[in-house]
Image (cartoon, rainbow, N blue to C red):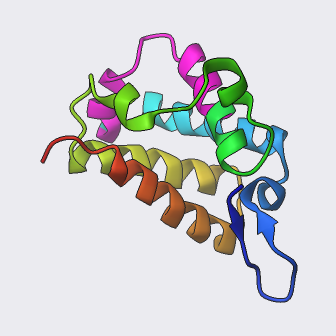
Amino acid sequence: MLSINEPGSETASFFQRIGGETHIRELVDAFYDVMDEDPQTDTVRRMHPDDLSGSRTKLYEFLVGWMGGPPLYMNKYGHPRLRMRHLPFEIDEAARDQWMHCMVIAMQRVGLDETLRRDLEKSLYAVADFMRNTQ
């Protein structure tokens, strides 16, 4: 379980800090809305199917578990094997940055507090950077 030490409180997971599954769903929906609307994210958008409903569900299920909630994704699909699942796509720094752009804007849209946004951005950047498979 991923946990973050907050000053003056016990250790809390991202799942607890964000407020559970409902708020993760809102974040994922905002993320894909940005990806669908923002021409700056064209490269990463083209890596996804026209219908984003399956992508929305998988990212939601993954993030719930990754943030410390129930392991929805793992229960359904097994270990995420993120690098392997992303190998068919050419992911360079630009694609990573476009993905992060969508997530940063989504976090702002759903109104996450600054500390949580900063902590999530740092952790998600590490995951997004790990997905790079080309220069």
Secondary structure that dominates the magenta span: helix
Left or right relative to 85: residue 24: right
Q: Nearer the viewer, residue 124 or 103?
A: 124
Residue 15 percent coordinates (x, y): 77, 53
Examine the structure image and report whether residue 97 is included in the region drawn in magenta: no
Q: Tell me where the magenta segment starts and ends, as one range.
A: 40-60
Q: Residue at x 64, y 50 (%)?
A: 109
Look at the image and tell me in which quarter the N terminus lies: bottom right
The answer to which of 35 and 11 lies nearer the viewer is 11
Q: Is residue 125 above or below residue 7?
A: above
**For residue 60, side relative to residue 47 (left or right):** right
Q: Quadrant of residue 23?
A: top right
- Whether the magenta-drawn stretch holds residue 59 is answered as yes
Residue 48 pos. (x, y %): 39, 20
Position of 1 with respect to 123 (left or right) is right
Residue furthest to the bottom: 8
Residue occupying image coordinates x 45% and y 27%: 36
Above or below 109: residue 37: above
Quarter-of-image position of residue 88: top left
Which residue is situated farthest in the front direction here? 79
Q: Residue furthest left?
A: 135
Q: Is residue 68 left or right of residue 52?
A: right
| x then y, percent, for residue 4 | 70, 71
Give the residue displayed 66% in from the left and 28% down from the top. Answer: 73
- The mark total stands at 0
Residue appearing at x 66%, y 29% in the figure: 74
Figure check: 90 above or below 49 = below
